[in-house]
Image: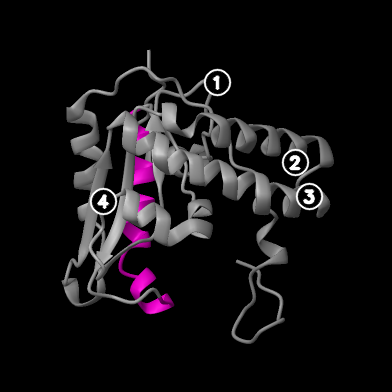
Amino acid sequence: MPESSGDLFEIIATTRSMRRLKPDPVPPELIRKILEAGTAAPSGGNMQRWRFLVVTDPNVKQAVGTYYKRAWDEVVYPRYSAGDPAPGTSPERFRRMLDAAQYLADHIHEAPVWIVPCMAGATTSRTAGSSIYPAVQNMLLAARALGLGATLTTLYLTFEKEVESALGLPAAVHSYALLPIGYPIGRFGPVRRVPLAEIVYRDRWGQPYSP
């Protein structure tokens, strides 16, 4: 039974990256709900230049998955494994995160559904990103609310041209993320972040913030 939730703040607090996913099919009506949540997000001028590619074709996923695995093996894993743990994360917990990321690299093609958020007619930039990533977060929250696991990854962009060619994207369209979606292996749990006191300032940079 999917571990669904209807409380917004609980959903936000437990929407962590679920990198281990079952290959079981996901009903199309749930994917539609996720997509509708994405299109409810704001975009610059309400222009809605986003486009969403839903990928279920095993051959496409296998082709893209090969580049994803190369990016992990050749670039990302060496960098993360040689570096320090993420802020507020113990070495043991960081090791478990790397193990989960390794699992995703090995099995991403087995996730039953991918959603690839794209932007038409825009060059990749902070301004363009502000009109697509709110939709991405909405979709991640919607997946969590429906008891589905998902994660946002851009690792494949190491081989951006090859992957976008495999996805059949036109030259004027760029992908901004890849969201593998499926029923999770394991349970949702609270996200772990550093305290607000370490990252929030009041009025001027570096000035302590207190509610």
User: From what the image shows, is residue 10 above or below residue 26?
Assistant: below
Where disc 2 sits, the SS reads helix
Q: Mark 4 points at which residue?
A: 38
User: From what the image shows, is residue 160 above or below residue 178?
Assistant: below
Q: Mark 3 points at which residue?
A: 85
- Residue 154 is labelled as none
Give the amino acid type for the residue marked by disc 2 in the picture. Answer: Phe
Residue 143, magenta (yes or no): yes
Q: Which residue is drawn at 37% across and 78% down?
A: 127
Residue 47 x, y percent position in the rendering: 16, 72
Q: Contact, CB < 8 Å: mark 3 with mark 4?
A: no
Q: Name the residue under label 1.
A: 186
Q: Mark 2 points at which residue?
A: 94
Estimate the spatial distance between the alpha carbons at disc 2 and disc 1, rounded to whole Å.
17 Å
Residue 132 x, y percent position in the rendering: 32, 63
Where disc 1 sits, the SS reads loop
Estimate the spatial distance between the alpha carbons at disc 4 and disc 2, rounded to whole Å.
30 Å
Estimate the spatial distance between the alpha carbons at disc 2 and disc 3, rounded to whole Å.
6 Å
Q: What stretch is highlighted in magenta?
A: 125-146
